[in-house]
Amino acid sequence: MNISNTEMQSLKDNGFLIKKNVFNINQIEKIKKIIKLNPEGRNRKNYFPINFKAFLVKAIKFDFKKIINSLYLLNIKKKLKLDLTADIFFEKKSKLIQLDAYYNSTNKKEILPWHSDQSLNHPVRPENFPSPDLFYLKFFFYLTNVGSKNGCTSYIGGSHKITHIVRECIYENKIEYRPFWNLKDLVSLITDSKNYEIIAEKLGSKTLVESFLKKAKIAEDDKNSEIFDFNADPGDLLIFNEGGLHKGSQPATNERIALRYLYTTFF
């Protein structure tokens, strides 16, 4: 799989990129069978070993099926050159830190609301707040059809820049930490009179802050808005910066099956 310079810049600017037809039909069917061995949600059984220690544990437990399946998935990662893509994105050496899968049966329940990962949705001492550069680049392979109100991962383009600055300001003790995992809390933190100017100055543009706040208002006020959604077919790939605002809509018309590779520079 080749990522052009234009596509890589789009990924860095917008926070996400969609690649079409990455998996062929044989790969799709085989991986679906692997994932559906452990149905429903994302749990320990849907994690796959990626290092020697984890493989050894599986061997001790005689879980050779999981070993074989994981080796197959890691070989796909190698063929698609995901390691190289992640290194180019981060502009430094990165590492596959997690390989897991999702299976969601057809239902009317939203998978996840608007949120930003690595925002720490719980009290934390200022000195323990992690580096703002700690986040995952996620390769999200869809194995079933997704779209608006049917399991797609909606994403507010450019929001990863805002959340990175927020994490940076907290890390540097320029603004006081408070949880901002969900969209409402993030907007409240940014629009706080004590924080707004600091965040805008750090970002270098009030225009970018206001642009995000307008998008956030649409996402928060209009639950039926589809402007942040997209359609994807089985075999399509979504690459995204997990720091940006995203959500998983309800798999209303068909089950959702997806495979994820997570990369970071912190290891």
Image (tube, rainbow, N blue to C red):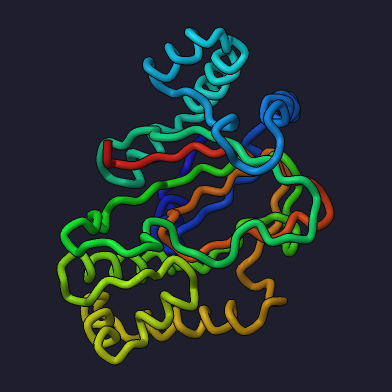
Instruction: State left or right for residue 247 relative to residue 193.
Output: right
Q: The C terminus lies in which quarter of the figure?
A: top left
Count the labels in the image: 0
**Residue 37, image x, y percentages:** 71, 26
Relative depth, front residue between 249 and 84: 249
Q: Image point 57% across, 12% down: which residue? A: 63
Judged from this view, the residue extending furthest toward the right is 253
The image quarter containing residue 201 is bottom left
**Residue 159, image x, y percentages:** 43, 69
Q: Image point 29% across, 82% down: which residue? A: 205
The image quarter containing residue 83 is top left
Q: Image point 16% across, 59% down: which residue? A: 127
Q: Is residue 29 above or below residue 216?
A: above
**Residue 18, image x, y percentages:** 58, 51
Q: Is residue 224 above or below residue 146?
A: below
Q: Is residue 95 above or below residue 174?
A: above
**Residue 38, image x, y percentages:** 68, 30
Instruction: State left or right for residue 113 relative to residue 185.
Output: right
Relative depth, front residue between 210 and 251: 251
Q: Is residue 159 above or below residue 214?
A: above
Q: Image point 44% across, 34% down: which residue? A: 98
Instruction: State left or right for residue 15 relative to residue 196.
Output: right
